[in-house]
Structures are given as C-alpha cells and as structure tokens.
C-alpha cells in the first residue's frame, strides 16, 4: 500500500490494499461512493464500510447507500 494513503489503518491491510489498487487512497474520493460498489471489491466488507463512514462523517463526507 502507498505511504500516501489516508485510509484508516483500522480497516486492515487487505481492504486498504484493494481499495488502493482501485485508485482509492484519499478519504475525499469516497464522498458519494456507492456502498454496494465498494462491497464488490475483494477484501472490502461491512467492517471496512463502517470504519470508512466513521472517518468520513466528521469531515462532512458520506457514502451513498
């Protein structure tokens, strides 16, 4: 995984790596992203989505259902 990633370490290595492979390394890239599409990425499960939500909400961003 890139050292420049903003993704929370709590998400786990696999989910962070797979999201980075899809070009998603910054929290602002997830604003409006579909939970369904993210869950379709290998290694991204409900726990990763929950952690993302927890980190997006305080900065005024959110996932689409």
Image (spheres, grey):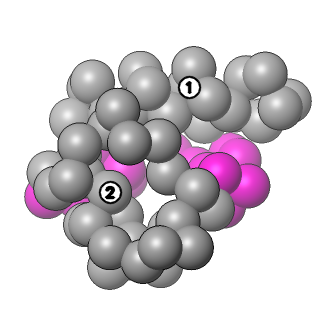
Q: Nearer the viewer, mark 2 or mark 1?
A: 2
Q: Which mark is residue 26?
A: none
The numbered dot on residue 53 is 1
Q: CA distance from mark 2 to mark 1?
A: 14 Å
Q: Tag 1's secondary structure?
A: helix
Residue at image position (32%, 73%) is 1
Q: Residue furthest front?
A: 3
Magenta segment includes 37 = yes
Query: Is 22 placed above or below 53 here?
Result: below
Image coords of residue 38 (percent x, y): 36, 50
In the image, is 11 to the left or to the right of 58? left
Q: Is residue 35 magenta?
A: yes
**What residue is shown with label 2?**
16
Residue 62, picture quadrant: top right
Between 10 and 25, the residue placed more toward the observer is 10
Please indicate whether residue 9 sits to the left or right of residue 55 in the image: left
Q: Residue, x 56% and y 25% (percent of image)?
A: 53
The segment highlighted magenta reads 27-42
Query: Which picture quadrant has residue 56?
Result: top right
Q: Position of residue 61 (x, y in %)?
A: 77, 35
Q: Is residue 44 above or below residue 46?
A: below
Question: Which SS class for mark 2?
Answer: helix
At x 25% / y 66%, what residue is drawn?
18
């Amino acid at each position: 995984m890139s050292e420049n990633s903003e993704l929370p370490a709590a998400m786990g290595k696999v989910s962070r790596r797979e999201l980075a492979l899809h070009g998603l390394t910054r929290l602002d890239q997830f604003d409006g992203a579909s939970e369904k599409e993210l869950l379709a990425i290998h290694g991204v499960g409900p726990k990763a989505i929950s952690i993302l939500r927890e980190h997006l909400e305080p900065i005024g961003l959110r996932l689409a259902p």
